[in-house]
Image (spheres, rainbow, N blue to C red):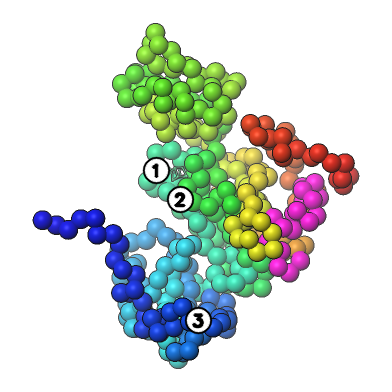
Amino acid sequence: MPKIDNGPPDYRLNLPPIVKENYGKWEYHESPRPGVLKHVGPAGALYSVRAGSPRLVSVDFIRDVCALADKYCDGYLRFTSRNNIEFLLSDEANVEPLIEECEAQGLPVGGTGASISNVVHTQGWVHCHTPATDASGITKAVMDDLFEYFKRDDLPNKLRIAMACCLNMCGAAHVSDIALVGVHRTVPRIDHEAVRKSTEIPSLVACCPTAAIRPDPKNKSVTVVEERCMYCGNCYTMSPGMHIMDAKNDGVAILIGGKVSNARTAPAFSRMVIPFLPNNPPRWPEVTEAVRGIVDLWIANARKGERLGEWIERIGWERFFDLSGIPFTDKHIDDYIFSRETFRTGAAFKY
Ligand code: SF4
Ligand code: SF4
């Protein structure tokens, strides 16, 4: 009988000896250069060399990375929560040779401190059935454009970018400095036969956040009240008969100003600033240009230590729209159930 319900391997089995010896006793850390961290404890120092990864990788890629870890790190490495690779070294003399070999193999070293680290992203057209855009393609295009900021650590603060290919927002798009989110713009086309054959209709009716879906018992299907639909695509998740994809009308919205840490200010949700940009594969030039515009504006104007959302809250959103040149439209005004909280209830604003 194979063993089941084992859980993951005990993480302690894979810790480098220097981490085991210093476990729970670390004294401080510093960053000798972008992409390198030095953690110091009573048993000595651990050097972490952080390299970007595309997340979606081949077994050959993993083997190449393991070969580097064998050569320079006694076989030890880890992956970070943003899918970067961290090589874990106890010998400082190996740090520079490892960096040189990483760069030679196309593994950029960076992503520490006040930088733009890896983009947390999703499946896109590679593997999911509900996306409104691609994930790996758009992430590559955006990071190519922002590459210099991965390797620098002198920005006002860290800037987190996340990408989700539909409004399910798998990942971190709802709480990131900049989020790219795939959006639809057309009402689902109903395939009644598919709905009849494969759908639990009460669940389909209940999944719609705006109650746009009504049961149609005579046809054993549903109808959609078109003017109530805001194209979230949730009904397609429930039923293969609710076709929402539309190559010409699907695209990308940009949300900004979110964060998860409690440093200085409370965690915040990202807010929509650009309702729609077209899907323009393979390089999504409209999206990369918009993201760079926002990043450069923040770098030029924020105070040291200010996250993107903190800078905007200080200057005011109307000033941000002014400075960025992004048009403010009725699409920006929240009209969902709890929208009242987002309206201005004071007289303080800038002309
Ligand atoms: S965000 Fe949506 S489309 Fe993308 S992987 Fe998640 S569920 Fe699929
Ligand atoms: S796309 Fe969303 S809003 Fe429109 S009918 Fe489907 S679930 Fe309702």
- Residue 321, given in percent of the width and then of the height, sits at 77, 47
In the orientation shown, which residue stands out farthest toward the bottom? Answer: 93
Q: Which-is-in-front pick, marks 3 and 1?
A: 3
Of pointers 3 and 1, the one earlier in the residue sequence: 3
Q: For the magenta stretch, what is the residue range?
A: 303-321
The percent position of residue 190, horizontal first and vertical second, equals 43, 21
| Distance from Cα at disc 3 to Cα at disc 2 | 34 Å
Give the main secondary structure, helix, strand or loop, of the magenta stretch. helix
Tell me, yes or no, whether the highlighted magenta stretch contains residue 304. Answer: yes
Which residue appears at 34% of the width and 70% of the height?
11
In the image, what residue type sits under mark 1?
Cys
Report the disc number at residue 26: 3
Residue that label 1 marks: 128
* Badge number at residue 122: 2
Asked if the residue under mark 2 is in contact with the one under mark 1, i.e. CB atoms within 8 Å, the reply is: yes
State yes or no: Cβ of the residue under disc 1 lies below 8 Å from any atom of ligand 1. yes
Q: Which quadrant of the rendered structure holds the C terminus?
A: top right
Does 28 appear in magenta? no
Residue 329, above or below 119: above
Please identify the residue farthest to the top as the structure is shown: 218
Residue type, numbered disc 3: Trp
Q: Residue at x 54, y 29 (%)?
A: 209
On the image, which quarter does residue 87 sit in?
bottom left
